[in-house]
């Protein structure tokens, strides 16, 4: 899925008519520069310019799960920068913006570098139509964008509108401002996490009792229940040895406005302030909280510094305010145990991690009862101090997942019998379970196959886009097969050299995306990951994968060259032709054994020779005998090699008795191994550009190269040598634009 932003100037025709062409050119340059700067800040890519309109894509190449949110943020920022402002000394501009989210087919090269026609789909037309229903200076959203940004952006719904080409009216929302995410209520059952809570609680209790500060990290993917675990942990460690523990909690929203915004949230959480409180109340609360923690002579200045931090975290003295609050927490820890917890710290700027590390180091030096708790994804790239304890949140078991689903279905008024269908889809993720039940409430058909809910789709897309090019291509190839896919099959599907896929598949197993079977095959570990990965494949690539998977295996026996017939001694009657429907070829024998014409016939009455063992056949056929096997494999000769005429006949694998008790006086007839398969097809030509990161599908109908490298968004970047990121760990997801973020294409 991609998010499309469409921005256009209100009344541009009348504006151009009354301006000189040179003034129009200067106005357009200033307008396009402003729009492009905002798009680069929020990692959008310009898809095309249409007169004075600009269309941009978000999440076309790399998705972080917040593509729609970034697009809406960009739209609001464009309005602040353009609306009612005179650019290049010209008249004041008014612009309208429409934002739509949906599926599209994306040209990855165009999505990286920007270019006309990089994306195709109904979502592009929807975004262009929506901007016409936005007020001047406003941003209009479709229903999918509304759902993706609910709770993060303040929105107002307008009556449904009739868009051109749409069969029914379309729901539209107007985005007005950003909102601070409200604390999530955790009122459901807490299942399957007793060990994790016990492990984290033990570390916090030891930190308080031994007065040795500790860093505890709750690590898990999106939807694993990190926030719920942190909430339960704060309840279970409310006191230690009957001494109250003071908790200071902060939650990092996606893309915070300022680097030290989470530190300001710690101050608000400790003092009980809200973002809408008037300045007088803020100063009173700060003075009461700092009393006794700072010297009296420094109290007024400290209150003013922290008040400025709460009002504007980007103020010039924000670093000074953070240092002041760190000293206040250390003074508080000298009085009672303190736990500083930050949820979703992987979204924050590096300054927040620096603040927490400095706090822990100072508390360790003073031997204070203080602990730091962070919740983040496994890909968080910031180094943890030593010693740091990692509490990993693994997927819930089937029993706990079933209990959670039954509770959610009862509360939603849905049949509990749906648990059997939902259990394999949720994959042990509490967040996925809630999303699937919510999709049922919102109208998903209980009888048909359940579609992947949008929150789950966004999370899986972001997970796949964090892979590099080879990993993503291999995962797509495995997802295209209904059964376990061995490494040689992946090599054949992607056009790779033999052996290239094996280390890539092993890395995917280590990441938990694939499982390896006892027979050496690989399968996608989660059903929903396979569904999303397969949905991202264009139909042409799916057809090419199917053709390559069915290639040599379904070819018939190799043709017999007419120049080398089987000779019969004179006077020998010809073998009668088989009757209708008769097939003397053994179905299980992978090779045919044919008597050599040079071998003399066995005299009458001579007992039949013992069949040669497998090693003998391999040696005489010129191939090495495989170790510890009872089935012979077909050796494919090089292209153009001559074949020997054959008369099909069974070859029985020789057992232990045959190997040790075959009579040395009876020599078996010489046999020639004739493979069933045709010569190996020539290697496919390399892709244009020599890109080593994806399958070198030959250009032509039904291939990736034949469709111009376009992949279904979010399609796997088969043609990518890497993920296009400067941060392979994916640490930039959800961070503010000024944070070290993944390298993205400029507008």
Image (spheres, rainbow, N blue to C red):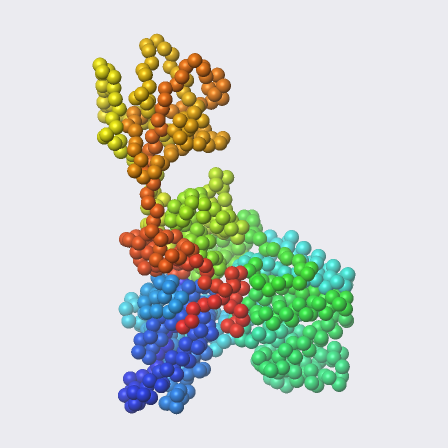
On the rendered structure, is 595 left or right of 207?
left
In the rendered view, tell whether residue 269 sits above or below residue 654. below
Can residue 99 be seen in the rendering of this structure? no
Q: Quadrant of the N terminus?
A: bottom left
Q: Residue 313 in the image: state x and y as whole percent.
A: 59, 79
On the rendered structure, is 186 left or right of 475?
right
> What's the residue at 56%, 49% (across, down)?
397
Q: Residue 422 in the image: state x and y as whole percent.
A: 47, 51
Q: Nearer the viewer, residue 98 or 189?
A: 98
Q: Quadrant of residue 445?
A: bottom left
In the rendered view, tell whether residue 407 sits above or below residue 287. above
Q: Residue 469 in the image: state x and y as whole percent.
A: 44, 56
> What's the residue at 32%, 64% (across, down)?
120
Total numbered circles = 0
Q: Residue 158 in the image: state x and y as whole percent.
A: 39, 75
Can residue 89 be seen in the rendering of this structure? yes
Q: Quadrant of the C terminus?
A: bottom left
């Amino acid at each position: 899925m991609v998010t499309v932003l469409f921005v256009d100037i209100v009344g541009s025709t009348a504006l151009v008519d009354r301006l000189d062409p040179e003034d129009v050119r200067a106005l357009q340059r200033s307008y396009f520069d402003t729009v492009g700067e905002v798009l680069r800040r929020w990692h959008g890519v310009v898809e095309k310019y249409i007169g004075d309109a600009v269309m941009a894509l978000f999440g076309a190449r790399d998705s972080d799960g917040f593509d729609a949110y970034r697009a809406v943020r960009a739209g609001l920022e464009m309005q602040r920068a353009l609306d009612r402002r005179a650019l290049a000394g010209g008249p004041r501009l008014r612009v309208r913006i429409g934002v739509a989210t949906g599926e599209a087919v994306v040209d990855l090269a165009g999505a990286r570098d920007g270019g006309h026609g990089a994306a195709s789909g109904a979502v592009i037309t929807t975004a262009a139509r929506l901007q016409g229903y936005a007020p001047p200076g406003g941003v209009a959203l479709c229903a999918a964008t509304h759902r993706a940004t609910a709770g993060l952006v303040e929105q107002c719904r307008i009556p449904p509108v009739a868009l051109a080409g749409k069969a029914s009216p379309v729901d539209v929302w107007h985005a007005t401002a950003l909102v601070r995410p409200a604390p999530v209520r955790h009122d459901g059952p807490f299942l399957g996490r007793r060990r994790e809570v016990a492990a984290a609680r033990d570390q916090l209790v030891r930190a308080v009792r031994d007065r040795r500060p500790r860093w505890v990290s709750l690590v898990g993917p999106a939807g694993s229940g990190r926030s719920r675990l942190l909430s339960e942990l704060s309840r279970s460690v409310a006191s230690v040895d009957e001494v109250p523990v003071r908790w200071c909690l902060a939650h990092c929203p996606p893309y915070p406005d300022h680097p030290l915004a989470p530190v300001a949230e710690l101050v608000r959480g400790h003092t009980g302030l809200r973002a809408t409180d008037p300045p007088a109340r803020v100063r009173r609360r700060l003075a009461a909280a700092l009393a006794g923690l700072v010297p009296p002579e420094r109290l007024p200045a400290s209150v003013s510094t922290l008040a400025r931090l709460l009002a504007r975290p980007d103020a010039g003295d924000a670093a000074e305010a953070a240092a002041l609050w760190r000293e206040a927490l250390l003074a508080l820890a000298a009085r009672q145990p303190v736990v500083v917890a930050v949820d979703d710290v992987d979204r924050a700027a590096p300054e927040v991690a620096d603040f927490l590390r400095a706090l822990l180091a100072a508390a360790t030096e003073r031997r204070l009862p203080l602990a730091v708790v962070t919740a983040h994804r496994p890909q968080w790239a910031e180094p943890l101090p030593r010693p740091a304890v990692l509490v990993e949140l693994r997927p819930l078991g089937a029993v706990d997942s079933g209990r959670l689903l039954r509770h959610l279905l009862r509360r939603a008024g849905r049949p509990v019998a749906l648990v059997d269908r939902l259990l394999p889809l949720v994959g042990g993720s509490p967040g996925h379970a809630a999303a699937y039940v919510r999709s049922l409430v919102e109208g998903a058909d209980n009888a048909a196959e359940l579609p992947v809910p949008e929150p789950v789709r966004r999370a899986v897309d972001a997970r796949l886009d964090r892979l590099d090019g080879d990993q993503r291509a291999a995962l797509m190839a495995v997802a295209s097969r209904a059964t376990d896919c061995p490494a040689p099959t992946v090599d054949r599907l992607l056009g790779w050299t033999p052996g290239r896929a094996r280390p890539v598949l092993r890395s995917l197993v280590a990441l938990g995306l694939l499982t390896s079977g006892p027979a050496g095959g690989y399968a996608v570990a989660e059903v929903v990951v396979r569904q999303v990965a397969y949905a991202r494949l264009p139909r042409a690539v799916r057809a090419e994968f199917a053709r390559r998977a069915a290639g040599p295996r379904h070819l018939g026996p190799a043709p017999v060259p007419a120049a080398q017939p089987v000779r019969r001694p004179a006077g020998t009657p010809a073998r009668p032709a088989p009757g209708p429907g008769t097939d003397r070829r053994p179905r299980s024998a992978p090779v045919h054994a044919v008597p050599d014409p040079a071998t003399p016939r066995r005299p009458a009455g001579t007992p039949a020779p013992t069949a040669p063992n497998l090693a003998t056949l391999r040696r005489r056929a010129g191939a090495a005998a495989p170790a510890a096997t009872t089935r012979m494999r077909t050796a494919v000769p090089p292209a153009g090699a001559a074949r020997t005429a054959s008369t099909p006949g069974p070859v029985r694998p020789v057992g232990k008795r045959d190997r040790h008790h075959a009579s040395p006086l009876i020599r078996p007839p010489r046999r020639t191994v004739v493979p069933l398969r045709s010569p190996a097809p020539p290697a496919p030509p390399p892709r244009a550009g020599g890109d080593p990161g994806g399958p070198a599908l030959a250009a032509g109908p039904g291939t990736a190269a034949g469709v111009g490298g376009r992949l279904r968004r979010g399609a796997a970047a088969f043609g990518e040598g890497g993920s296009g990121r400067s941060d392979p760990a994916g640490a930039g997801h959800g961070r503010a634009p000024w944070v070290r973020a993944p390298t993205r294409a400029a507008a």
